[in-house]
Image (tube, rainbow, N blue to C red):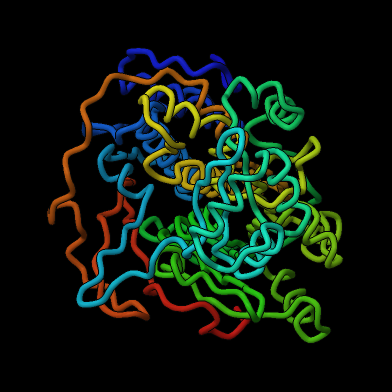
Amino acid sequence: MPDTASSVAPQLNDATATARDFLQVFWAALDGAPQAAAKVKFTGTGALPSVFAVTDLAVAATGAAGLALSELIGEHHGDAPPLTVDRRLASFWFSRTVRPVGWKMPPQWDAVAGDYATADGWIRLHTNAAHHRAAALGVLGVPEDKEAVARAVARWQGAALESAVVEAGGCAAQMRSVDEWAAHPQGCAVAAEPLLLWRSAAEAPRAAWRGTRERPLAGVRVLDLTRILAGPVATRFLAGFGANVLRIDPPDWDEDSLAPEVTLGKRCARLDLRAAEGRARFEALLRQADVLVHGYRSDALSGLGYDEAARQRLRPGLVDISLDAYGWSGPWRERRGFDSLVQMSCGIAEAGMRLQKLDRPTPLPVQALDYATGYLLAAAALRGLTLRLPEGRGSVVRASLARTAALLTAMPVPAQRELAAETAMDLSPEIEATGWGPARRIAPPLQVSGTAMHWDHPAGPLGRAEAAW
């Protein structure tokens, strides 16, 4: 089965078969026994509107994380329980799940972010972070005004502007086709990478944790150094089954638009890793962690003195899970990136525009690269915990948004009717007391026999907890 980028050619195919194909690719990347995938049952019909198999990706990624959880339960309790993924709810969980009661969610994008016509095509500017916005506006020489930005961008060649913004410390992506990306040096590098880069790490004695069948991850300590969006999705999943997730952010970082989504089930603290006190506290936390999930650029933690070898020295036996936007090799391996930018770079937005005969970039209906990779990261963390049980051996696992995109663009697109609109029946009955006000959420998409997906802490602002286990 192909799992590298190729020309987009939607095909008619059975939806369940496509989801099964995705699941088999995910489970093989996790080095799982092929026959285990039969434990996953898919229910429901319908698909998100896209020229790519987004719903099949969603249901399979959710299933892979659930399957890894089932296997871990089996290692502890003697039998791996069956599981069910709801196709409709899995699709909805690839977007915002919070439904505020009496308050409004912050806007997803700032006033400048978006797609702009260049002299020779299109480019996307990602400017939600203040320093990224300042970099783009500085290159363009305009104030924070969308019309002024559009006029300035129109005078640039796309590749030149992309390079200029990136070199200034900002985030931008020129729109390319799938074939153009396949011929690009970074596209070639990503295509040569496995879906997961996986290797064993050092062994170490440790105090055993043992969750219950009802809360299988109770006692597992997960140190969360992630930002928008794949990494937080991974740790949210782990928290949903009892993991003690402690998220660490720098003093000046906020995610106003997504915090109600991604802080569910977590305690969130702040540390300055450039200060002696912050570093000492971080190292103490890491020494007691079972899992580390981080989504900084590949050079960022190394620059702070915490490269892979240092992390393993501080915590032998650590399950070390990391994320990169554009892959772990090639000329862009250290480039800043987000889901919406990778969709522009790798041909997804161009294919949507061309195949739907539209006049502007047309990305996926959801940030599916983030969510699918997030569930894959969660599955890798669970597989790492399972593999550590016999002898305390750690794992180092790497994934990238660009490699997930390569898989998605290679898969056939099944013929499916569009999902019906959301109704009250899709929501959990519980009221969540978030830090912004009461809310309901979309019901969990995953049912694992004998355990329930629920969260011990409501969502709340970053930095509200102490940096301690």
Question: Where is 52 relative to 127, above or below?
Answer: above
Placement of 38 over or under 157, stated as above or below: above
Which residue does the image show at 35% across and 56% down from the upper left?
96
Which residue corresponds to the image point at 27% horizontal and 40% vertical from the top-left? 86
Q: Position of residue 118 (x, y in %)?
A: 59, 41
Which residue occupies the foreground of this view, 75 or 338? 338
Q: How many numbered markers are drawn?
A: 0
Percent across and percent down for residue 335 are: 73, 48
Q: In which quarter of the view is residue 405 placed?
A: top right
The quarter of the picture where the N terminus appears is top right
Residue 140 vs 57, above or below: the answer is below
In the displayed structure, does residue 314 sit left or right of residue 242?
Answer: right
Identify which residue, 442 or 176, lies in the foreground. 176
Left or right: residue 300 versus residue 225 is: right
Q: Is residue 239 left or right of residue 224?
A: left
**Residue at position x 57%, y 26% in the image:** 177
- The answer to whether residue 148 is seen in the rendering is yes
Q: Position of residue 410 (x, y in %)?
A: 52, 21
Considering every residue shown, the one lying at the far left of the view is 424
The residue under the point 20% across, 57% down is 427
Out of 250 and 350, give the one closest to the viewer. 350
Q: Nearer the viewer, residue 140 or 90?
A: 140
Q: Quadrant of the C terminus?
A: bottom right
Which percent across, then down, holds residue 390?
Answer: 66, 46
The answer to whether residue 71 is visible is no
